[in-house]
Amino acid sequence: MTDTTTGAVASSAETPLDDEARRRGLRKVIMAAGTGHFVEWFDFGLYGTLATIISVNFFQQGNAQAALLSAFAVFGAGFVMRPLGGLFWGSLGDRVGRKTTLATVILVTSGATVVMGLLPTYDMVGLWAPILLVLVRLVQGFAAGGESSGATTLLAEYAPSNRRGFVTSFVDVFGFAAFVVGGGLVLLFTSTLGPDALNEWGWRALFLLALPLGLVGVYLRLKLEDTPEFQALQKKGEVSKSPLRTSLRTSWRALLFCVGFVVIKAVGHWILQTFMPSYLQTDLGFSQPVSYAVTVSGLLVIAILVPFMGLLSDRVGRKPVMIAGCVGFIVLTYPALMLMGSGNILGATVAMILLGLFMAAYDGASSAAMAELFPTNIRYGSMAIAYNLSVAVFGGITPYFATFLIVSSGNRFAPAFYVMAAAAVTLVVVLRARETFKRPLISEA
């Protein structure tokens, strides 16, 4: 029977191993996938959190807003490489396995982040500083192209069928935890060392933490066995030799749905994780420590609530939870930014937490929803193509475009319109998608 959403053919042997077998060692799998994801996004997200400091160290000074725009442009450059990374790592993951591919992804990202912590500044080498920064960001972006889709695939294929939303939600739990820890460390360094020391050398120490964290992530992932779903394909000799070609031929409709699912995910993540610290400082007038504290509070709420939203999606379906997140963004993003702009710390914190609630709702259901669109033999690569294409187009430009909207319009709250538009696009796609939460994973396209 052919599914009209995925274009995949279901069989009577859709689930290679029963749920009890999947539960054995599930905590170990969550920790390995989650720790690796934590490392990946701790490294990748530090750039965004430290964007204001990077703008001072790597670009010619004179116009703080222009320097910040330049820093965000370099941030976006990393996203240019994500689709290429998705093509490479996704195909590799579907051909040779999930765990080895994901371990290599961490190694490359951590290495690039360590190099970033050693780069010379503009005062040292002039224009070579931003050039070298761009090159390192391109390497980071290439590696990141294989992380989110791979970690989601790993967890989805290990998860019991009735808890797939809950288990896959830990991708976002650990991802946001990484931003919480990264933002918390920046806040700690700012409070203890002072802004001057953080600007001069403290930022380097944060990037250099990538080395030990990366080694831990590689070790944990290499200790895993590959997923039951992938091992079953290997035993039957059904591993795809050309997963990308198969995906485009049999699952193009599912690819389009996945691209649409990711639009608000990409925009929402990078607004909250990357744009907010500099926005609170540069545009709303909060101090550096307060800006980091407000941002961290919102990200912490997301990390705590995501698994509960994932569990809810296992009970009521993916679509209702995803729709709730989209509607929340459409209706309340502008009022939330207005509340932030009141200049009251409590108001800014409440607004950030409110936006975090909508993000948690959407993330809790969407990871499983994306994994359920594709069959096992092309799942990693298909998700990687769709996810990274959407993130590159919509997520990578988010900090830059949000800043541009403020500069060009003179409206401090203009970024809300971008978030609202992204949520509206995703809402239309979700409404047109089929519900997938009660279906078993399909093994082969």
Image (cartoon, helix red, strand yellow):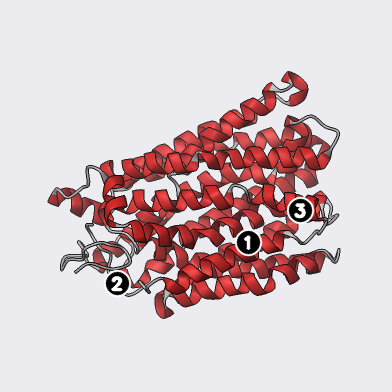
With 323 as the anchor, is 19 left or right in this view?
A: left
Compared to 132, does 159 lie above or below?
A: below
Q: Secondary structure at mark 2?
A: loop
Image point (51%, 33%), residue name: 139
Query: Which residue position holds label 3?
Result: 279
Image height of 48 relative to 26, above or below: above
| Residue 406 found in image quarter | bottom right
Instruction: Please report whichever mark, 3 or 1, sits nearer to the chain's N-terminal start.
Output: 3
Query: As shown in the figure, which amino acid type bears the numbered disc 3?
Result: Tyr
Q: Tell me the CA gap for discs 2 and 3.
A: 42 Å
Q: Is residue 211 visible?
A: no
Left or right of 39 on screen, residue 347: right
Q: Which residue lies under the disc numbered 1?
A: 300
Given residues 220 and 90, the one toward you in this image is: 90
Q: Secondary structure at mark 3?
A: helix
Tell me the tag on residue 439: 2
The picture places residue 257, in percent across and down from the top left corner, at 42, 62
- Determine crowd level at label 2: few under 14, some 14-19, many 20+ residues with C-alpha closer than 10 A: few
Residue situated in front as seen by the camera: 146 or 242: 242
Q: Which image quadrant: the N terminus? A: bottom left
Front tag of 2 and 1: 2
